[in-house]
């Protein structure tokens, strides 16, 4: 079996079955896109109760000025319900739409979880 290019994910992530989306951006499109991307991936069940989730996926956003135009930048980090220290963190590069930004975050997380 070939060696992984990455260190193993923390046990809390490896054994997680459920996630809660904590959208701290005030932008509903971000939560909707994250929900859709996570459901499509199918690795975790998205739950509506933070206390019942194995992992919490946090989203925070800001606009950055890129080539004279304001572009969305979203940071995503993952914690457990018991600890606030991030197990995973990703800041997307500014894209043209919120959907593209969130998709980039979820894709990076998926690759990390799957060891790619």
Image (cartoon, rainbow, N blue to C red):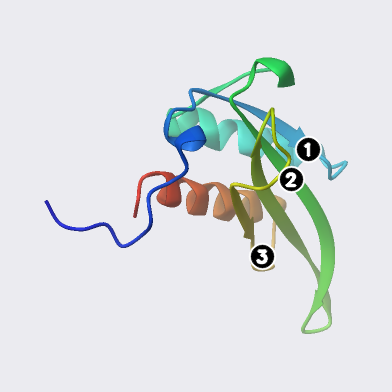
Q: Quadrant of the C terminus?
A: bottom left
- Which of label 2 and label 3 is nearer to you? 2
- Can you identify the residue that label 2 sits on? 59
Q: Earlier in the sequence, mark 2 or mark 3?
A: 2
Identify the residue at image location x=47%, y=43%: 10
Looking at this view, is 79 or 106 the one in front?
A: 79
Q: Label 2 vs label 1: CA separation?
A: 5 Å
Q: Earlier in the sequence, mark 1 or mark 3?
A: 1
Identify the residue at image location x=63%, y=38%: 34
Q: Quadrant of residue 37?
A: top right
Disc ID at residue 95: 3
Q: Label 2 vs label 3: CA separation?
A: 16 Å
Place of residue 110 in the rendered image (x, y in percent of width and height, measured from the top left): 45, 45
Q: Label 1 vs label 3: CA separation?
A: 18 Å
Q: Are marks 2 and 1 in contact (CB under 8 Å)?
A: yes
- Can you identify the residue that label 1 sits on? 23
Q: In this image, 111 relative to 105: left or right?
A: left
Q: Earlier in the sequence, mark 2 or mark 1?
A: 1
SS for dot 3: loop
Place of residue 19 in the rendered image (x, y in percent of width and height, measured from the top left): 60, 27
Q: Quadrant of residue 5?
A: bottom left
Looking at this view, is 17 or 37 the one in front?
A: 17
């Amino acid at each position: 079996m070939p060696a992984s290019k990455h260190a193993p994910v923390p046990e809390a992530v490896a054994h997680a079955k459920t996630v809660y989306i904590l959208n701290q951006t005030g932008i509903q499109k971000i939560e909707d896109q994250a929900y859709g991307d996570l459901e499509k991936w199918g690795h975790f069940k998205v739950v509506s109760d933070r206390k019942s989730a194995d992992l919490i996926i946090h989203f925070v956003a800001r606009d950055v000025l890129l080539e004279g135009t304001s572009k969305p930048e979203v940071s995503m980090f993952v914690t457990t319900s018991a600890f606030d220290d991030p197990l995973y963190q990703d800041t997307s590069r500014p894209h043209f739409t919120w959907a593209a930004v969130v998709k980039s975050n979820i894709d990076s997380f998926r690759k990390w979880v799957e060891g790619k």
